[in-house]
Amino acid sequence: MKFGVIVFPGSNCDHDCFHVVKNVLGQPVEYIWHDDIFGGEFDCIIVPGGFSYGDYLRTGAIARFSPAVNSLIDFANSGGPVIGICNGFQILLESGLLKGAMLRNTNMHFICKYVYIRVENIDTPFTNLCKPNQVLKIPIAHNEGNYYIDEVGLKDLKSNNQIVFRYSSKEGQIADKYNPNGAKDFIAGITNSKGNVLGLMPHPERCSEDVLNSTDGLLIFKSILNWTKVKT
């Protein structure tokens, strides 16, 4: 399975994602420069975290107009799996591939720490190896991770089972004190209506090896590989 990792000026998690795919999973992977266009040569696209274009205007607002993102939209609309992590999630929102928007964290500070997220939907290309309501230990690192969507949009997310991850306690309890950024309905990750595009604020690439104090993120990447095998 061949992965592509889009690189923007300001990306800082592209090498992490590349490392996990190539050296941990043993899969072919290539960088895609933001100015390049691509077609069907990839099986999965990763939009990594970072500060694309310095986060000027809004996070992801400039990156949305990159040629590579136009190719990404075509890839996603054709059913290709896409995972956007942190700034990648923000770019997916700005591009219209996912619904909603990101606000500043409610405490108005950058937050970098391990959190717990509960798996809400295991019937996706990204969570099919997870157990129902499984709790994952995954780090966050963001200033604008406060996911927002209006009540109509939230109702749609729920009815279509598009909420994939919610912030929780280690035991899976959902409560305000476990919501690190004030995200609406404790949302840490969602998919599009087709289920092939995932955006999440936590960083699975930063917890895919024992040396990083958690390997829970590897479940997400391995689920993508498993989904491809089952699909074929």
Image (cartoon, helix red, strand yellow):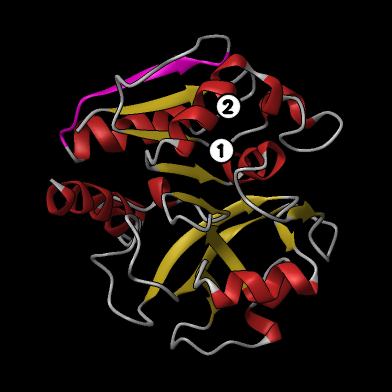
Q: Point out the residue furthest to the front here.
A: 78
Classify mark 1: helix, strand or loop: loop
Quadrant in the picture for the C terminus: top left
Residue pointed to by mark 1: 49
**Picture quadrant of residue 28:** top left
Classify residue 55 as left or right of residue 81: right
The residue carrying pointer 1 sits among few (fewer than 14), some (14 to 19) or many (20 or more) residues within 10 Å by Cα, namely many
Residue at the spot 28% in from the left edge and 54% down from the top edge? 218
Q: Point out the residue furthest to the top here.
A: 36
The residue carrying pointer 2 sits among few (fewer than 14), some (14 to 19) or many (20 or more) residues within 10 Å by Cα, namely some
Report how far apart the C-alphas of labels 1 and 2 lie in the structure.
6 Å
Q: Are marks 1 and 2 in contact (CB under 8 Å)?
A: yes
152, above or below 8, in the image: below
**Residue 62 place in picture, x, y as percent:** 75, 25
User: Is-magenta flag for residue 6?
Assistant: no
State the extent of the magenta-drawn residues as a range.
26-34
Residue at the spot 18% in from the left edge and 50% down from the top edge? 231
**Residue 167 place in picture, x, y as percent:** 57, 74
Residue at the spot 42% in from the left edge and 68% down from the top edge? 137
**Residue 80 place in picture, x, y as percent:** 37, 38
User: Which amino acid type is marked by label 2?
Assistant: Ser
Residue pointed to by mark 2: 11
Classify residue 121 as left or right of residue 55: left
34, above or below 24, in the image: above
48, above or below 197, in the image: above
Classify residue 216 as left or right of residue 121: left
User: Which amino acid type is marked by label 1?
Assistant: Gly
**Residue 132 place in picture, x, y as percent:** 33, 81
Give the numbered dot on residue 112.
none
70, above or below 149, in the image: above
Which tag, 1 or 2, sits closer to the chain's start?
2
